[in-house]
Image (cartoon, rainbow, N blue to C red):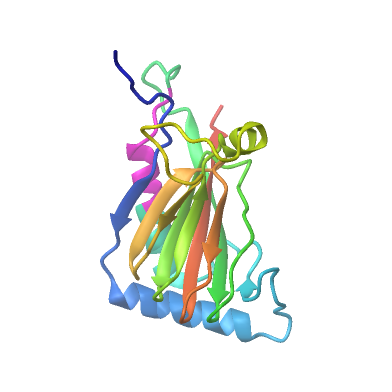
């Protein structure tokens, strides 16, 4: 008898080296969050909404290039025939969560990849990734789990400043409350046909 998992969901992690990068991004996010037009997001904290491509200056541009390079490395166009048929649009959103605040689960349906970059982490905080199979499983038999995969239908990542996670755009994610302030940059990568 053999049991093997099928249809694995990619989770790519990397560390971006740059305390200066985090200082610049953190300052830009704090300035935007303090603006009079900034409002509170559901779950507490602040979400920027879509940011312009030139937002965040050189620090954001550097991060976008790193994320795009990682996405290209982990993507393949199976019908390309050697041509580079897709470009990428990077949609940015900043998230600032004071102690105890969280975000509600969300996904990026237009994005092939989504990246979550931790500018500032805090003890107790987590990025929660929902198992895409869980709604049906929980509906049918909420207390049953597969013997080789008995975990709850949420995978938790405990990010530190400088950590980057690349996940499929369709994967629902949320930020759990922490004991201190958490600051993130979300980058959603939309594949655009060149032809």
Quadrant showing the N terminus = top left
For residue 64, above or below residue 162: above
Snapshot quadrant of residue 5 = top left
Horizontal and vertical percent for residue 55?
54, 69
Instruction: Give the residues in magenta.
Output: 67-77
Quadrant showing the C terminus = top right
Query: What residue is drawn where x is 62% and y is 86%?
Result: 34
| Residue furthest front as drawn | 143
As rendered, which of 98 and 112 lies closer to the eye? 98
Horizontal and vertical percent for residue 44?
65, 75
Snapshot quadrant of residue 150 = top left
Query: What residue is drawn where x is 34% and y is 68%?
Result: 160
Q: In the rendered structure, does residue 171 fall within the stretch colored magenta?
A: no
Q: In the rendered structure, does residue 70 fall within the stretch colored magenta?
A: yes
| Residue furthest top as drawn | 1
193 relative position to 163: left or right: right
Q: Main secondary structure of the magenta part?
A: helix
Horizontal and vertical percent for residue 114?
50, 48
């Amino acid at each position: 008898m053999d049991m093997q998992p099928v249809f694995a969901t990619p989770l790519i992690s990397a560390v971006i080296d740059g305390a200066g990068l985090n200082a610049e991004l953190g300052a830009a996010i704090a300035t935007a969050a303090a603006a009079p037009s900034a409002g509170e997001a559901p779950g507490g904290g602040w979400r920027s909404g879509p940011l312009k491509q030139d937002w965040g200056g050189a620090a954001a541009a550097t991060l976008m290039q790193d994320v795009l390079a990682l996405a290209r490395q982990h993507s393949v166009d199976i019908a390309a025939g050697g041509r580079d048929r897709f470009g990428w649009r990077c949609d940015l959103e900043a998230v600032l969560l004071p102690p105890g605040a969280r975000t509600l689960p969300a996904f990026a349906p237009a994005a092939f990849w989504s990246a979550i970059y931790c500018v500032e982490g805090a003890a107790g905080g987590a990025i929660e990734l929902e198992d895409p199979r869980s709604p049906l499983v929980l509906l049918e038999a909420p207390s049953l789990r597969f013997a080789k995969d008995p975990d709850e239908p949420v995978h938790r990542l405990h990010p530190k400043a400088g950590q980057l996670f690349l996940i499929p755009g369709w994967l629902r994610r949320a930020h759990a409350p922490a004991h201190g302030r958490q600051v993130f940059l979300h980058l959603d990568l939309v594949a655009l046909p060149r032809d």
